Image (cartoon, rainbow, N blue to C red):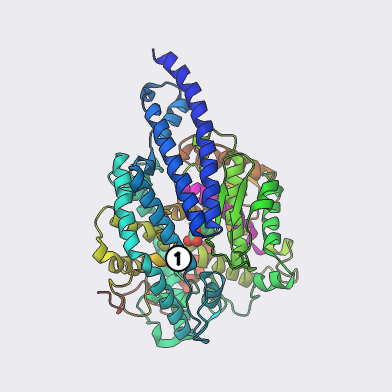
Amino acid sequence: AIEEEEIRARAYIQLLNEKTAKRANEASIANWNYASNITDENLKKQLEVSARVAKETKEDWLETIKFNWKSFSDPDLYRQFKKYSILGTAALPEDKYTKLDKIISDMQTIYSTAKICDFKTKDKCDLALEPEITNILIKSRDAEELKQIWLQWRNKTAAAKDLFKDYVSLSNEAATLNNFTDTADYWLYGYEAADFKDQVKKLWEQLRPLYLQIHAYVRTKLRERYGDIVSEKGPIPAHLLGNMWAQTWGHIFDFTMPSPGAQKLDVTEEMVKQGYTPEKMFKLSEEFFTSLNLSAMTDLFWERSILEKPKDGRELICHASAWDFYDQKDFRIKQCTRVDFTDLITAHHEMGHIQYYLQYKSQPQVFREGANDGFHEAVGDVMSLSVSTTKHLKKIGLIGADVPDNDDNDLNNLYKIGLDKIVFLPFGYLMDLWRWDVFEGKTSPEDYNCNWWKYRNEIQGIEPPVDRSEKDFDPAAKYHIVADVPYLRYFVSYVIQFQFHRAACEIAGEYDASDPKKPLHKCDIYQSTAAGNAIGKMLQLGSSRPWPDAMQALTGQREMDASGLLEYFKPLQKYLEEENKKNNAFIGWEASTKKCS
Ligand SMILES: C=C(C[SeH])C(=O)N1CCC[C@H]1C(=O)O
Ligand SMILES: [Zn+2]
């Protein structure tokens, strides 16, 4: 009868979790070895391990689906079987599985090893994305140089185009073998809400007015700096925004800040002056977590992480990442860290992933993941919202004690955070809007690039520095596109992290909606064990409960809600609306004059 089957199933799933954790550990080790040292040998080994793990996973899956799990009464057992019933890409025939695996590795290798030539020293052609190209995009104010760097990078990474086409069809084939309509459907499944696309669309519509304000303000400032190459009413040229993908604009803070007279708040200068090293940056981040009574890093973390770009000339994937080796001891970060404030924030972001791994390490293997993928991206950013306050930066000595905590400085700092958080929203949304269309067949290969620019234009209000065509393949200039990493998780994170921050700040007594002396944007939860314990309770759940349950544990809410972000930036929104009105700035943008054919 079903009771005895449930008893047998409980023993079965316990064993399956242990086998799956062991296989996940082996796969992580092989993936790490390849990602941290790109050689043919390491790729070969990675593909072999991956193929063996897929084969064994499929064999177990055939056993798992024999159980009558849909009739189980134990919700926890039911949820574990439900998760294991989705096989994933291992459903592909072995040859196609390895073909897809190799395509994704090869696309990442093209991206991670791409080199371009310097603009000033024409024959210096060994510039890598990190740190050389990134540094130029941060520092250069020469529109011609920025255009050349922007174009060269895209010329190199477009080489992934043919591989991407095969990736789309094989990925879709795997999705249909799992009874999804396509990969878009498979990617959205983890959010456990049939209307999740609509939920996200609604959030973007609520947040768009704030984005239009910061977009109009920045365009005004860019016109002052660069003249007519920035039109008064058109989209903003993408190469002038301090970032290769125009996804955050923090690096043009210095000549666009609201109160130029105020303290520049240049934490980077102070970090360099104080002799910060990448290791010190991660130790600082660890101390923030332990101040909340959350977990410290393990010994293996410090022994095995790669916290700065190796100098031994090897090729590696520099895009920052946090790794779980599923043995409750081995957790690592790989980051080609630069000593600057942006990378201090990224360090906190990656440490947030590790903290989540540590908090749910005692869950059964199948629940060792975020409540949804957005939760995983939000943990570190919640800490960064506290670290980024002038109050906290003074506490840790990165802003001088003499810097007055006046309105001008406060506005400047809020604007700087807005250049990351508000600005990011349309990019975080459009990345998968474009990919959903590709997987759903609405965008065919001959339209890849111009549909990409259609979204970049309509949603983000930016344009390329020169005309584009279908001979280009600009989406491949972004890591997540070539690495098969979904992106909606970041849009979700940028919304829910403010809900988490608001709840944590209330618990820490740092925020009170009715007390104008305790606005949300000045909250620093540092050393609040009460806040830390509440956050920890949410994280320990892993994916053992549907994400609304996890969100409710910390915030009392069960839905994503833009009000946290809007509340946090209210003072900035007021300033931007007044300033744009004063400048008679055009809000929004007309169609781009740049063509795509
Ligand atoms: C730092 C990571 C690793 Se999960 C990252 O990819 N992020 C963090 C912010 C958005 C996104 C990006 O860089 O595009
Ligand atoms: Zn992340």
Seen in the picture, residue 312 relative to 355 is either above or below; the reply is below
Q: Is mark 1 within 8 Å of ligand 1?
A: no
| Residue displayed at 32% across by 63% down | 162
- Residue 275 left/right relative to 372: right
Q: Residue type at mark 1? A: Tyr
Coordinates of residue 102 in the picture (x, y in percent): 40, 54
x and y, in percent, of residue 468 in the image: 31, 75
Q: Position of residue 295 (x, y in %)?
A: 67, 44
Say if the magenta span includes residue 266.
no
* Category of crowding for the residue at label 1, using alpha-carbon neighbours closer than 10 angstroms: few (below 14), some (14–19), many (at least 20): many
Helix, strand or loop: magenta stretch: helix
Q: Quadrant of the C terminus?
A: bottom left
Which residue occupies 53% across, 49% down?
A: 30
Q: Quadrant of the N terminus?
A: top left
- What span is in magenta? 373-391
Question: What residue is pinned by disc 1?
Answer: 111
